[in-house]
């Protein structure tokens, strides 16, 4: 009985094909958004560092002799590299110098959002709650695939909406302790001078946490968004607008 010849060996793999076309670049950020973004970043960093130096002059919250508000950093000095100004008066000068670009940039940004209608893609609404939960599952590795999104995902909308409110709170508490006599009604609204200092101080740590998480997510989830915030043009995974 004839034996069938063995099958021919498989053909060697051919050369790899040409890479697929790059995703088209889309215009993502107006120059006003980019300008105010980097202005806010620099001024916020300067205010945090000068604020830590101001805090070092009296590292408690409450009148001398107590009682004091709870403060995990009471009577502690922050490292010299994290403080700006060298002493109280110098730190105050730096703080006020960064305060005005921060306020001006924030007002310009909010005015642009209102005029352009872009606030609609940033404002967190009740309908975004489910999407925010799904996005959080993805970040916690409880979900494998990245949820679909537009220009901003629901968790980003929540963060950006919250940070605008926090910015307004920081400015108001800042003026309350900057002019406690002239703006006595505002200082009283926050519970007095020491209470206004307290809320102003803790806003610093929320801003710091936001900055750290924001930078990490940019590099881990969507690195092209950093280039977009510099050039205005985006070429990445999430090019669409809401």
Image: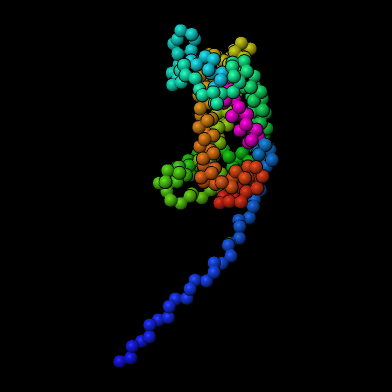
144 in relation to 128, above or below: below
Q: Quadrant of residue 103?
A: top right
Q: Residue furthest front?
A: 80
Does residue 190 show up magenta in the picture? no
| Res 85 seen here | yes
Q: Does the magenta stretch include residue 43?
A: yes
Residue under the image location 42 percent in, 43 percent down: 140
Q: In this view, does 185 lie to the left or right of 1?
A: right
Give the residues in magenta. Answer: 36-51
Residue 5: percent from left, percent from top: 38, 85
Q: Residue 198 or 50: which is nearer the viewer? A: 50
From the top left corner, tell me how far across and down residue 51 is, in percent: 57, 22
Q: Position of residue 161 (x, y in %)?
A: 55, 35
What residue is shown at x 46% (from left), y 7% (from top)? 65
Residue at x 58% of width, y 51% of height: 236
**23 or 192: which is nearer to us?**
23
Q: In this view, does 156 lie above or below 4?
A: above
Q: Can residue 153 be spotted in the picture? A: no
Residue 107: give x, y in percent of width and height.
66, 30
> For the stretch drawn in magenta, what is the main secondary structure?
helix
């Amino acid at each position: 009985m004839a034996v069938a010849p063995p099958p021919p060996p498989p053909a060697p793999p051919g050369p790899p094909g040409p890479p697929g076309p790059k995703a088209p670049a889309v215009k993502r950020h107006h120059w006003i958004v980019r300008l105010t973004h980097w202005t806010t970043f620099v001024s916020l960093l300067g205010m945090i560092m000068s604020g830590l130096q101001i805090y070092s002059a009296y590292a408690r919250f409450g009148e001398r002799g107590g009682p004091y508000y709870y403060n995990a950093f009471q009577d502690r000095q922050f490292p010299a590299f994290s403080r700006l100004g060298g002493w109280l008066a110098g730190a105050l000068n730096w703080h006020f110098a960064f305060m005005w670009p921060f306020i001006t940039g924030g007002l310009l940004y909010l005015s642009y959002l209102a005029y352009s209608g872009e606030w609609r893609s940033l404002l967190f609404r009740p309908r975004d709650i489910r999407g925010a939960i799904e996005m959080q599952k993805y970040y916690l590795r409880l979900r494998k695939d990245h949820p679909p999104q537009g220009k901003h995902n629901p968790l980003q909308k929540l963060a950006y909406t919250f940070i605008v409110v926090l910015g307004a709170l920081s400015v108001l508490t800042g003026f309350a302790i900057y002019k406690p006599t002239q703006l006595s009604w505002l200082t009283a609204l926050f519970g007095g001078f020491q209470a206004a200092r307290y809320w102003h101080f803790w806003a610093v740590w929320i801003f710091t946490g936001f900055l750290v998480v924001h930078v990490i997510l940019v590099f881990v989830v969507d690195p092209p968004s950093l280039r977009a915030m510099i050039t205005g043009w985006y070429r990445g995974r999430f090019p669409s607008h809401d």
